[in-house]
Image (cartoon, coloured by chain):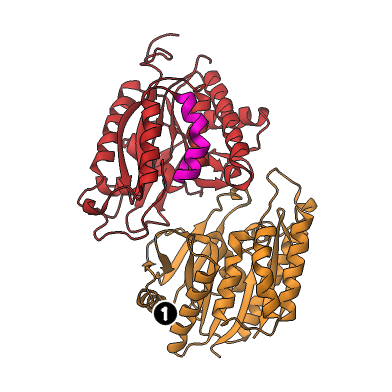
Amino acid sequence: MTIVSAFLVPGSPLPHLRPDVDSWRQFKVAMENVGEKLRASKPDVVLIYSTQWFAVLDEIWLTRHRSLDVHVDENWHEFGELPYDIHTDVDLANACIESCRAAGVNARGADYESFPIDTGTIVACNALKVGTPELPVVVASNNLYDNQAATEKLAALAVACISEKGKRIAVIGVGGLSGSVFTTAVDPVEDRVVKKVEDDCNKKILSLMESGNIQALREALNSYAKEARAEMGFKHFHWLLGALDGHFKGAIVHHYGAIYGSGAAVVEFSI
Amino acid sequence: MANGEIISGFIAPHPPHLVYGENPPQNEPKSTGGWEQLRWAYERARASIEELKPDVLLVHSPHWITSVGHHFIGVDHLQGRSVDPIFPNLFRFDYSINFDVELSEACCEEGRKAGLVTKMMRNPRFRPDYGTITTLHMIRPQWDIPVVSISANNTPYYLSMEEGLGEMDALGKATREAILKSGKRAVLLASNTLSHWHFHEEPVPPEDMSKEHPKNKIGYDWDMRMIELMRQGRMDEVFQLLPQFIEEAFAEVKSGAFTWMHAAMQYPNLPAQLHGYGTVIGTGNAVVEWNLVKAGLARMAGKAA
């Protein structure tokens, strides 16, 4: 098994920009904790998919060796900046591009100064302390026209490609759970999952992850994506399923809660 | 100061291909041209701007997406490099933009008074979206007119189209109030493509115009139908058809800029001037102007009210 660890983490910047808000800080702490577990699994590379990196024409992979910049979130600019310094395993990213093309998936690299790396990738790298010179990343975009099945295939393709190089892989899906948010200003202290039905759906899907009952989980995923208005159809979880070849034994939910009305969780999968 | 007014409004689409095709010094990638029909359309729009001599340009872009409220850039100046996340091979642009913070704040406040959630963007390290930059460059490459930059609140997608476009209507009316009170002569820019069906492969080179044409017939037919109504000044019909147009042509006007602009202009049933139409990776793009000075609804520069 070349996958050595797998995690689902939220891509919102709020836990990182506003750690003074207790409920949001718990996400940051949970992400830092699973970062330790990730590094303890001794991967050679971390394979990341973030719902917030949109692609449209083709599948874009980050191929810049070092991405060093300061990011300001388009929604939460008043809370400050997110500096980042992300190191990519360019050889592996290019191998994934070639593998995509061989499979008939249009793909290309992004190796440009000031390329706008998305908030989700940045907060995942910073909180989990990956994308370092010692532990580089391979980052794939979210092609908006890809469905859940295509996303699973993409992840499987990347894992197969990197495995061929003899590398140990940690995999991360970056994105939230239920998608409804508060659309007016709310006091962060009052934050909660905005719709009870979505809260219930989130808890049910997390419970199925914990159980490791993949068949039941798969049966629930379609209705979950609709009823919970799951972020991007929950493609970041399908990315994990594809990477894990559809198998994991169970999961530990390190934290579940609300981020401005949406549901979010930090989940570690037992593989 | 009072007697401000809106002197013109443009549909001013933002495909970065147009900047790439023009080869301005600010853009790192270089081309051998391409998309001339649309770039010539913008030349005609530029001539109109030169004649109008506005004090300020207001731009509403679908690529600054905000989930809580309508945001306005509230810093005097921003500069840096903008790289298009979708077409980084075409658009890596060094921008330097001056903002009319006074008017931005007034728009924000009028929006708040109208019951909208509004917010000023004060972070000096904020990077404007490429849609805003492309529209501004194509309409005024001298970059010598201050700007009000407005985000696209995502209510048309998050709630319903009707609710979302209702928000944009209220935003437009609030923008109008702010402009009237400012004493400034303003041009509005709706940074929107029309039909938005597109190809999923880019030709090599990207400016190979033998590969450029409408993605599908339904999108093209809708574009022609709507443009013809605009040219005839039948704007009531345009707005009656807008939801169907958005649905069937996947039109980017859903994001709200078009409604915002016309609400600010009080939905004039004026014949539009079509500066030109063309496709970009199959999407339909038109540069269209409603010139309120020519229509006798606004002053020429230097003329008292």
Q: Which amino acid lies under the numbered mark 1 shown in the image of this protein?
A: Leu
**SS majority, magenta:** helix
Tell me residue A260's x, y (percent): 70, 53
- Specify whether A202 is left or right of B227: right
- Chain letter, colour red: B
Instruction: Give whichever of A240, B67 is nearer the camera.
Output: A240
Was residue B245 drawn as part of the magenta stretch in this picture? yes
Badge 1: few (under 14), some or many (20 or more) residues near its Cα, within 10 Å? many
Instruction: Give whichever of B113, A108 is nearer the camera.
Output: A108
As helix, strand or loop, the secondary structure at mark 1 comes to helix
Q: Over which residues does the magenta segment extend?
A: B235-253
Residue closest to the far top: B304
Tell me residue B247's x, y (percent): 50, 44
| Residue depicted at 56% across the width and 70% down the height | A125
Which chain is mark 1 on? A
What number of labels is visible?
1
Q: Look at mark 1 in the image and give the residue it sits on.
A: A92
Tell me residue B18's x, y (percent): 30, 45
In what quadrant of the picture does the C terminus of chain B appear? top left
Tell me residue A97's x, y (percent): 38, 74
- Rendered position, A150 above or below B224: below
Question: Is any part of residue B86 visible from this angle?
Answer: yes
Question: Is any part of residue B136 visible from this angle?
Answer: no
Instruction: Give whichever of B192, A120 is nearer the camera.
Output: B192
- Rendered position, B13 above or below A105: above
| Residue depicted at 51% across the width and 46% down the height | B64
Was residue B251 drawn as part of the magenta stretch in this picture? yes
Shade of chain A as shown in the rendered figure: orange
- Rendered position, A165 above or below A113: below
- Specify whether A33 is left or right of B167: right
